[in-house]
């Protein structure tokens, strides 16, 4: 039995006599409480500033525990993150009073985020569909001739032939056992890897990172985002190249000038680079691309799930990869929802799921993956920008993460927590990028086994 002996003059103080176990198991620490209050203030700061209230402590002093508790419980972002885990008879006002009377845990030991990997069988299995960036055992027909052309010094006369040969060799390299390929070319595996890395743009650190992430992972489920995106980022992408990968490309009158210029080629390269950075058996044949003005004049890009459409009005990779993050979040939700696509209101990161129901229609393995995904996004919110209600939304946190993930994968802004272009302060690290790769690899495996 646990009893808080607090001042009885305040009508809102509670007698915590029947709470089970150790209170540290479910009560927030002082640090967590202050983070919760800061988030609440940032969500409503424009309103509070009208009353010249510049901190959450001023808000609490001005409005009192009861009124502030109502705000906390009405904000879904706050409720889901901090209040939903409380015992049934403990409410926001109780937590506030505990804080005011110095009864919250000061140095609460928080369990660090941990990702539990599954063992993916090493035996090879076929997988469909075959994607341009997916290891699919591309035939080695005439590979010796391709290699001899690819290793030539580039001149004005042979430039097209050599670059095409390098692209073809690159795809064969990504799709086959490197030892077998090097034996066929009669060169050492390291020599072949060094040659591929030289023209694909990978440095030693990037290569080691990718190899470590694929350690013990069967070829068909391996993640080649670093190699693929670095290579494709140096290629010229035309309209036909992109059109093969997506449902459709619509060019409006406003977007026609940009799409036909170097900026249009930049958009196409950003899109294909983003696809290849994520890779691992995800296809985009249902995705529509529209180049032109967004419905909101202030938006640089928008995603509409009912049409599976990304609208791009701003020519930069941040916009492209951010909206692609929204597309992926909804795509993962589509996989578990049996209703028509147009009825889905949230991506998986925001969705409140009835697991008792989904256990009857989904595989156990899929349920476990869903929980891992949502736990992963929850961990991202601990490291994300909390400056406003918009930046705190889980869907926006995930979209910004995908933007940073693609930048890291392609070698840009690898360690920057602050992206000067977007202006958001997110503290995502390489550890989060690696965990997301694990999620993709497991998603690929479960899909191939018809478990998703």
Image: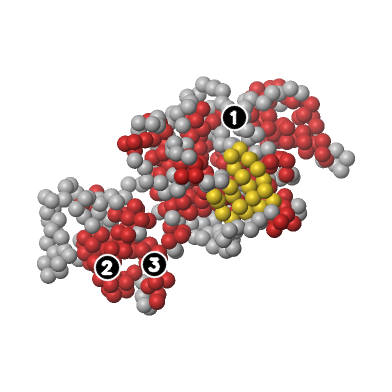
Query: 410 or 96: which is nearer to us?
Result: 96
Question: What is the secondary structure assignment of the residue under circle 3?
Answer: loop
Q: Residue at x 67, y 46 (%)?
A: 249
Residue 348 visible in image: yes
Point out residue 42 in the picture as x, y percentages from the top left corner: 40, 66
Question: What is the secondary structure assignment of the residue under circle 1?
Answer: loop
Query: 241 or 377: which is nearer to us?
Result: 241
Q: Disc 1 and disc 3: Cα gap in Å?
A: 47 Å
Q: Residue at x 22, y 50 (%)?
A: 87
Q: Disc 3 and disc 2: Cα gap in Å?
A: 14 Å
Q: Which residue is drawn at 76% across and 52% down?
A: 260
Say which residue label 3 marks: 44
Residue 186 visible in image: no
Question: What is the secondary structure assignment of the residue under circle 2?
Answer: helix
Residue 178: which quarter of the image?
A: top right
Say which residue label 1 marks: 129
Q: Which residue is drawn at 80% across and 36% down?
A: 162
Q: Which mark is residue 67?
A: 2
Q: Mark 1 or mark 2: name the one nearer the start of the chain.
A: 2
């Amino acid at each position: 039995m646990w009893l808080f002996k607090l001042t009885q003059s305040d009508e809102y103080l509670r007698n915590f006599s029947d709470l089970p176990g150790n209170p540290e198991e479910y009560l927030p620490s002082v640090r967590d409480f202050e983070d919760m209050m800061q988030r609440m203030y940032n969500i409503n700061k424009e309103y509070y500033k009208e009353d010249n209230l510049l901190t959450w402590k001023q808000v609490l002093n001005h409005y009192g525990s009861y009124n502030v508790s109502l705000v906390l419980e009405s904000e879904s972002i706050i409720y889901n993150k901090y209040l939903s885990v409380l015992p049934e008879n403990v409410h926001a006002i109780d937590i506030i009073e505990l804080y005011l009377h110095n009864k919250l845990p000061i140095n609460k030991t928080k369990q660090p985020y941990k990702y539990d990997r599954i063992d993916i069988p090493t035996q090879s299995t076929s997988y469909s569909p075959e994607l341009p960036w997916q290891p699919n055992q591309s035939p080695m027909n005439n590979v010796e001739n391709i290699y001899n052309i690819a290793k030539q010094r580039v001149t004005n006369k042979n430039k097209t032939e050599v670059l095409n040969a390098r692209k073809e060799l690159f795809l064969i390299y990504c799709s086959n056992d490197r030892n077998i390929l090097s034996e066929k070319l009669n060169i050492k595996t390291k020599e072949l890897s060094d040659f591929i890395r030289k023209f694909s743009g990978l440095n030693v650190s990037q290569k080691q990172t990718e190899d470590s992430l694929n350690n013990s992972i069967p070829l068909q489920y391996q993640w080649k985002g670093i190699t693929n995106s670095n290579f494709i980022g140096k290629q010229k992408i035309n309209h036909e190249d992109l059109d093969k990968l997506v449902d459709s490309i619509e060019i409006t009158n406003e977007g026609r000038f940009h799409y036909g210029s170097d900026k249009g080629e930049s958009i196409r390269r950003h899109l294909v680079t983003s696809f290849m950075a994520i890779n691992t058996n995800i296809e985009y044949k249902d995705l529509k691309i529209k180049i032109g003005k967004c419905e909101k004049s202030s938006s640089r890009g928008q995603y509409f799930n009912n049409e599976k459409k990304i609208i791009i009005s701003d020519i930069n990779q941040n916009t492209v990869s951010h909206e692609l993050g929204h597309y992926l979040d909804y795509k993962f939700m589509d996989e578990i929802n049996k209703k028509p696509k147009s009825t889905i209101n949230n991506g998986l990161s925001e969705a409140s799921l009835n697991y008792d129901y989904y256990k009857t229609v989904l595989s156990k393995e899929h349920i476990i993956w869903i929980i891992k995904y949502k736990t992963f996004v929850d961990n991202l919110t601990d490291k994300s920008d909390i400056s406003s209600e918009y930046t705190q939304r889980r869907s926006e946190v995930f979209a910004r993460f995908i933007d940073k993930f693609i930048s890291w994968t392609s070698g840009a802004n690898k360690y920057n927590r602050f992206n000067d272009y977007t202006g958001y302060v997110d503290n995502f690290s390489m550890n989060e990028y690696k965990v997301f790769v694990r999620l993709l690899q497991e998603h690929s495996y479960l899909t191939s086994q018809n478990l998703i």
